[in-house]
Image (cartoon, coloured by chain):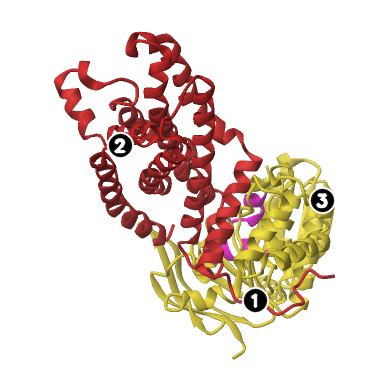
Amino acid sequence: MTLAIETSALVKHFGDTKAVDGIDLQIQRGSVYGLLGPNGAGKTTTIRVLSTLLRPDGGTALVLGHDVAREPAKVRERVCLTGQFASVDEDLTGHENLVLVARLFGYGWKPARARADELLEAFDLGEAAAKQVRTYSGGMRRKLDIAASLVVTPELLFLDEPTTGLDPRSRNQVWDIVRSIAASGTTVLLTTQYLEEADRLAGRLAVIDHGRLIAEGTSRELKRSVGSNTLHLRLDDAARLADAQRILEQVFGAGVHNGSDAHTLTARVDGDGGVHEALAALQSAGVSVAELTLGQPSLDDVFFALTGTTGEHETEETLA
Amino acid sequence: MSMLATSPRPRAASPWAATITLGWRAMLKIKHVPFQLFDVTAFPLMMTLMFTYLFGGALAGSVKQYVQYLIPGIVVQTIVFITVYTGVGLNSDISKGLFDRFRSVPIWQPAPIFGALLGDVFRYSLAATMVITLGIIMGFRPAAGFVGVVLAVALIIVFAMSLSWMWIIVGMLVKSPESVMTSSFLLLFPLTMASNIFVDPKTMPRLLQVLVSVNPVSHLATASRGLMHGDVAMSDVLYVLVATAVITAVFAPIAMRMYHRER
């Protein structure tokens, strides 16, 4: 058995809302797998069903060979979940939180304390060990939360938006942690709204929107499906954006959309065909170009191509 | 790096060990956030001082006599008020995602509830000690001595546990810990005021007298006075125990059902 997770036509609804609407997943053991999608796409619900916190309303889900609906206890023995909100007790110290979790996992008092010390050191939280968690920064809480999930080594680790709201330094630390967990052979299923994160960490990705799986594959495959190259254009004058878009559409067809801000446009390009032509047309129309790059499509572009909206905007809202 | 455990994975905690551990957690919370205990005990303590010195003489002839009547009832009121923290704590655990962690660990699933109740017993004992100490300073002299006081507190705690089940339900129903607090006082005020905690109901209107006489809190206060002063009527103790059993039988199964249901 090489599959860590296998779902077929998985459905979960809340009232009339279908949060998960028929998702099929096959996730190899020992891999890092990313569920990518905007807020409300159904990522968290999927993870909560797979970690036995919610019962599916339809379809089946096998986690490490056990049906989540029929054998939830068997699943719980093998997986760990780090939820979207740091699920640590703010009133307790970092050390006490880890002792608590270690005790629940079956450690005696003394080994539990030893394991807590060990984890606090490994996660660079040694100095804050005796401080109440309410004094911790977001990054420290998240690290403590992940540490709590690693008290015993799970065969499968669920990470729900592990870096949402973290500063770049903490984000890098969490990425390193995820990589070393994966290197030890634990399967990791993570959700993220950050396309960059999915690109960097996950071997394979599933793009989810409105509870449905809209694309699946390696990040390279997903990018290839969008077109071989992407042209990013930055204008001096945002007022000329509409003109520039019209010109680019004449050259490249329909694959032109707004970029991450009011000054930028993104276009799908096959090979490098038409780039010179487009530049000349822009020049003769008097649209001055501040910056132009031609490169591999980013997952942003993939997301746009699949859903018609940029994932980026939702990401920025969350950060604000 | 010892991020990952090097020793083999132990078997998950037994129901007993998990409950004890979660009870330990509840006690740590009392240690780290003692204010949570004081804000509910402050009110009954204030009532004690106010009733004793303002009305004590008028109600019972003398302050000294009134304290003997009032203190057992105040212990009842204090503990009955604190029961709401079972629901408040559960609600904040759920909203902060802590319950997701507990529920995804392979432990006996009701352990978090029973662990919280275990912590509550400690909390109740601590609050009772505070009130009785204040009482003794004010001249309270329980005739049945230490044993009588301990028996009375034990009876009060048994009754309080049955109320906890109601707050567990409320804690799972409402949105925020504050709303658990607010909604609980709608019940707790009438329950403790329409009783014989503060005054003998003889001078109350007829209808209120009937209410007071069926209120289990009145019987609990009477039984506590009896146990502390050595003249207990077994009928009151029995009334309290039956009320406890009935309240638990009604609310505990509903609470456990809601707890097992997913959120």
Q: Which residues are magenta?
A: A300-315
Return the chain for callout 3: A
SS class of the residue under badge 2?
A: loop
Marker disc for residue A283: 3
Q: State the separation of the CA atoms marked 1 and 3.
A: 70 Å
Q: Mark 1 vs mark 2: give the one in front.
A: 2
Which residue occupies the extreme left position in the image?
B206
Q: Which residue is mark 1?
A: B10
Gap in Å between the C-alphas at discs 3 and 2? Answer: 101 Å
* Whether label 1 touches label 3, CB < 8 Å: no
Disc 3 and disc 2 in contact, CB within 8 angstroms: no
Q: Are marks 1 and 3 on the same chain?
A: no
Residue placed at 60% from the left, 54% from the top? B24
Quadrant for the N terminus of chain B, please: bottom right
Spot the red chain and give its letter.
B
The residue that appears at 60% across and 52% down in the rendered structure is B25
Side of B195 where A110 appears, left or right:
right
- Which residue lies at the image location 57% right of the left edge and 69% below the top edge? B13
- Residue beneath label 2, please? B232
